[in-house]
Amino acid sequence: MSKKVLIISGSPRKGGNSDLLCDEFMRGAQDSGHTVDKINLSQKNVGYCRACYYCRSKGGKCIIKDDMAEILQSIIDADVIVMASPVYFYSIDAQLKAVIDRTVARWLEVKDKEFYYIMTAADDTSAAMETTLACFRGYADCVEGAKEMGVIYGCGVYEKGEIKGTSAMSKAYDMGRSV
């Protein structure tokens, strides 16, 4: 059965390490016959949630007019959501955090999703990724019917492209194929 896969790349660098893992995941999912859309947050304009709750009285419409309405609709429509981020001070980056926070406008419509998480860090231990993974899981805990399907750690990579040729690349492709 073909699924709608949405990949949200929080990498501020197009072609950065976490972004390259997204591309491999996408290639694997497409090779398995799934429909895949990838959003590069570095190319989007997404403001932070102001907690004004305008969305409550306006049927889920946000007071901020930016790219988030389109992104949120893609999240709602997807069967599978892949979230990717470089590790910034043991957490996800600001671009992806803003998107997660802004789903509040229609968060009850985000349900029954399969989640995959991709993280990269200069630190060469997976222990450095645990708090970042907790951020992803915290969001999924708020999504009714969410299922964690896979996690990819790209450890010990800092410079753009260092992830190439690592086992994380083949793991990303294989995980995409297994969707």
Image (cartoon, helix red, strand yellow):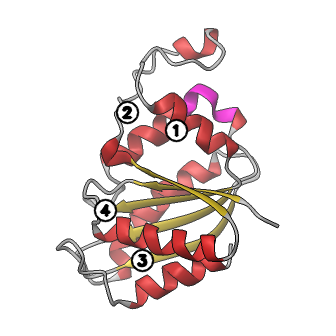
Residues at marks 1 and 2 touching, judged by CB atoms closer than 8 Å: yes
- Judging by the rendered image, the residue that carries numbered circle 2 is 46
Number of the label disc, if any, that sits on residue 153: 3
Residue 115 at x, y = what percent?
Answer: 62, 61
Residue 90's tag is: 4
Foreground residue, 139 or 168?
168
Which residue shows up at 46% across the image and 64% down it? 133
Calculate the distance from the C-alpha at mark 2 to the C-alpha at mark 4: 22 Å
Query: What residue appears at the point 51 percent right and 65 percent down from the top-left corner?
Result: 117
Q: Residues within 10 Å of mark 1 (few under 14, many from 20)?
A: many
User: Which comes before the other along the chain, label 4 or label 3?
Assistant: 4
Against 163, residue 11 (above or below) is above
Q: Are marks 3 and 2 in contact (CB under 8 Å)?
A: no
Spatial CA span between label 1 and label 2? 9 Å
Quick one: SS at disc 1? helix
Say which mark, if any, is on residue 71: 1
Left or right for 40, reference 117: left
On-image quarter of the C terminus:
bottom right
- Residue 27 percent location from the top left of the image: 53, 73
Residue lying farthest top?
57
Query: Going by the picture, which residue comes out furthest to the left?
Result: 159
What amino acid is found at the position of numbered circle 4 in the picture?
Answer: Tyr
